[in-house]
Image (cartoon, rainbow, N blue to C red):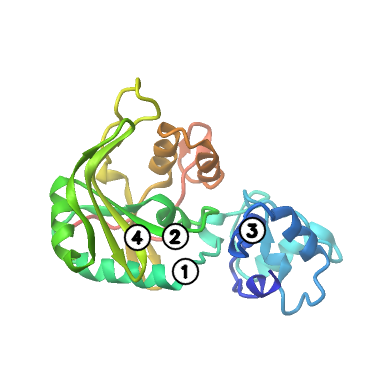
């Protein structure tokens, strides 16, 4: 746990839950807090860079308490909104090396192609500083895009793109395996929480945002749309995590995120 905390760079913060997940024990957020409270080497293990799930400054036992924690973070360039760290700007993004390699390959294959696509699911959330650890990659597109992506990633195919429908999901679906990372492509995806509900409207490409990760522009679904999608699926725990990161424009009493870039689509 101390090793992971020591990797948080200046100008970034992680949450207690994020550290717990990275240690392989996602239920141990409180234990992480207790361990950091007794941090034996605060110089090499920057426990002041660990904050609450919503960016709140909690759990600092150093001299001056939370006021000192804020001063240290501001000195390092961490952004704040009110009394909380702006996780959409200063959250530490920790992505598995194999997943990052798979993502780079996908972007290289699809860049310059006339395909409407963007990332959804846990990888999209992690890139936008939501407290999740992704293990796979979800690509959202339309029917035409799904079939085109099939051609670009053909040697990684595990399940060819075809129309699939279940009680709660329907899309043009294909599955791929890149560097041992599962990649799912969903064209014209529509969902519902219960079998008696109406189907949701397929993904909207106007909700796409571009962000920069390691000098690479990546299209992702906006947190607003991710939040609404998880609500429709009845996945309230993850929806609440997303809601805590909504900043910017007003939305149901919350704020939407401001991204590094918002680049027009080709």
Q: Quadrant of the C terminus?
A: bottom left
Farthest residue toward the right? 63
Classify residue 106 as left or right of residue 145. right
Q: Earlier in the sequence, mark 1 or mark 3?
A: 3
Mark 2 lies on residue: 135
x, y percent for residue 80: 61, 56
Residue at point 27%, 66% (across, down): 106
Q: Which residue is mark 4?
A: 182
Q: Secondary structure at mark 1?
A: loop
Q: Earlier in the sequence, mark 4 or mark 1?
A: 1
Above or below for 259 versus 74: above
- Residue receiving disc 1: 96
Label 2, label 1: how many angstroms apart (C-alpha)? 8 Å
Q: Under tag 3, what secondary structure?
A: loop
The residue drawn where x is 69% and y is 54% is: 29
Locate residue 118, reporting x and y percent. Answer: 29, 54
Q: Are marks 4 and 2 in contact (CB under 8 Å)?
A: yes
State if disc 3 and disc 4 touch (CB < 8 Å).
no
Q: Which mark is drawn over residue 25?
A: 3
Dot 4, crowdedness within 10 Å: few (<14), some or many (≥20)?
some
Cα distance in 3D space between marks 4 and 2: 8 Å
Q: Earlier in the sequence, mark 4 or mark 3?
A: 3
Q: Position of residue 41 (x, y in %)?
A: 79, 77
Find out whether the residues at labels 1 and 3 contact each other: C-beta distance under 8 Å: no
Q: Is residue 172 above or below residue 85?
A: above
Q: In this figure, what is the number of numbered marks?
A: 4
Tag 2 and tag 1, C-beta contact below 8 Å: yes
**Numbered badge on residue 193:** none
Q: Nearer the viewer, mark 1 or mark 3?
A: 3
């Amino acid at each position: 746990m101390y090793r992971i905390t020591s990797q948080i760079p200046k100008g970034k913060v992680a949450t207690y839950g994020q550290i717990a997940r990275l240690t392989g024990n996602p239920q141990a957020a409180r234990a992480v807090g207790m361990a950091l409270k007794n941090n034996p080497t605060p110089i090499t293990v920057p426990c002041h860079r660990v904050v609450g799930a919503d960016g709140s400054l909690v759990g600092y036992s150093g001299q001056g308490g939370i006021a000192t924690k804020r001063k240290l973070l501001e000195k390092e360039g961490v952004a704040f909104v009110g009394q909380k760290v702006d996780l959409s700007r200063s959250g530490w993004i920790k992505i598995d090396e194999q997943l990052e390699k798979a993502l780079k390959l996908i972007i290289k294959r699809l860049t310059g192609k006339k395909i409407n696509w963007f990332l959804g699911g846990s990888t999209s959330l992690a890139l936008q500083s939501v407290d999740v650890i992704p293990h796979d990659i979800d690509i959202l597109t339309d029917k035409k895009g799904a079939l085109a992506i099939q051609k670009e990633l053909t040697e990684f195919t595990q399940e060819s793109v075809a129309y699939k429908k279940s009680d709660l999901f329907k899309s043009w679906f294909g599955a791929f395996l890149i560097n041992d990372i599962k990649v799912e492509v969903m064209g014209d995806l529509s969902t519902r929480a219960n079998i008696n509900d109406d189907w949701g409207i397929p993904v909207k490409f106007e909700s796409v945002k571009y962000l920069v990760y390691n000098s690479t522009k990546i299209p992702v679904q906006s947190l607003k749309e991710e939040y609404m999608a998880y609500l429709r699926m009845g996945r309230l725990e993850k929806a609440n995590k997303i809601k805590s990161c909504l900043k910017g424009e007003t939305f149901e009493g919350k704020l939407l995120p401001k991204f590094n870039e918002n680049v027009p689509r080709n």
